[in-house]
Image: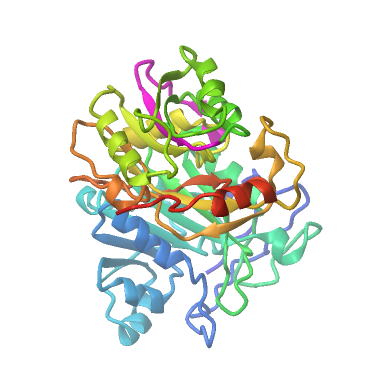
Amino acid sequence: MCAQQNQTNGLENHYFIKSGYMPQALEKYLQNHDLDEGDALCLPDVYPFAAFLGQRFGCKHIIDIGQGNLRPLADLSEKFHIVRIGSMEKMHYHTQQYNLGEWIEWDFKKPDRFLLPEKTLMQAVIICSDMIEHLANPSHLLEVLKGWLDHAPVCILTTPERDLIHGKGHTGPPTNPAHVREWNISEIEKLFLSIGFKVKFIGLTATSDLDYEKKTILAILEKNGSPINRIDGTVNEVTSNFRVVALMASYNEEDIIVPSISHLIKQGIEVYLIDSSTDSTFDLAKQFLGRGLIGIEKYPKEGQSSTFDLYKILKRKEEITREIKADWFIQHDADEIHVSPKPNVNLREALYAVDRAGFNCVDYIEITFHPTDNEFVSGSDFESYFKYFGFNTARRMITWKNFGQSISLARSGSHEIRFKGRKVYPYKFLLKHYLYRSQEHGEKRYFGRENLDTIP
């Protein structure tokens, strides 16, 4: 099975690979090269991630194309019906080793429009792992995937990252004789966008579990017609009446309250503030009334308290959600920055996309920043000043759609919003947490008062 590199086989545009790059002269498949895994597990994070997306999208099927990994697919077969698509010669080997559901023969090199039932695609995660680099003309495969994404919610596509493997000066051909050509991440993004894919994410994933070096491109391709796709510069307009309100709590945050509220307003988010401070936080915040701050109250109303009663404040937030008409709410503290998962898309736009996609709750990855000096200037941009952080593994499902439902926020201690019919968005937003900003602030916060954040 081979193909000459000429204009008749669709290579005249070089698939957006840099000028001067030389592909393989012939297409040379290595028989069963993907099956001899030895002690290494290839793409160890791809298949668990596919299972995660399948669960979040409510899928029943995994459609695996071509070069997939048998061991992790066998694990997925307990929860999903596996549909494998590839050559008949591989089918005989695979069926002897694993019982992995359904096998469908398809010659990837032919320009046939390969159809699958719409009902299957609508409930399927598609995996195309390390396949397109093997094809003399990958356009046929990519066009089929594009058609499937009229119905399927998502496709995960991987391929080696040429520059990370060989260096930026590499001009081909690939050292692996089974590869016709290899891309870097910028080139393949241009290829995807030229075909019309909605690129949700493009980045890197671990190539194998031997060293977990991230030298493989991973692209998440969304269902056609997704509401927001800023990678290629297009944005679907957010309706003017789409309203997001952050329910913010503060306790002695005079050093950051102004930039904290300002950041949310710039992101298109309105703010309701519950303040328990003994410093000037309340007075500083009042300047935003009528300019994005829609309400402010002291808690407790009867006077200052020696403790910050988180449980009662969260119960008050539950009450406020019944008093304010908003499309979405955010449980927010003054020492947090919430970030959209997509560059150049603000928080309001991102939540609109979540809403349009049919989900009603957002989860976060939380990172906690720590001071390395005592030079932070009160009132300045704390997000820009602090550079060093650690990951927090706690669940933070704290942003939700308001459709009149009864919610529970207090019992989780602000970590998880609970309500019937919750459908969590598959892709996490980012939460930056700035617990303390100096040695003095840390000592005051943790040793200056007792019963911090008490929950009965």
Q: Nearer the viewer, residue 139 or 242?
A: 242
Q: Quadrant of residue 236?
A: top left
Magenta segment: does it hold 249?
yes
> Can you say whether 238 is above or below 434 in the image?
above
Name the residue located 20 percent from the left edge and 50 percent from the top edge: 119
Q: Is residue 27 visible?
A: yes
Q: Position of residue 10 (x, y in %)?
A: 57, 48
Q: Is residue 167 left or right of residue 212?
A: right
Residue drawn at x 25%, y 73% as measured from the top left: 78
| Quadrant of the frame with the C terminus | bottom left
Q: Residue at x 31, y 52 (%)?
A: 412
- Range shown magenta: 230-252
**Residue drawn at (64%, 64%) of the image:** 215
State the scheme by which the image is colored.
Answer: rainbow
How far across and down, in percent of the image, does residue 375 sit?
77, 42
**What x and y, as percent, mark residue 322?**
23, 28
Tell whether 101 sits left or right of 387. Answer: left
Give the percent coordinates (x, y) of residue 202. Answer: 55, 49
Residue 366 shown left or right of residue 425 in the figure: right
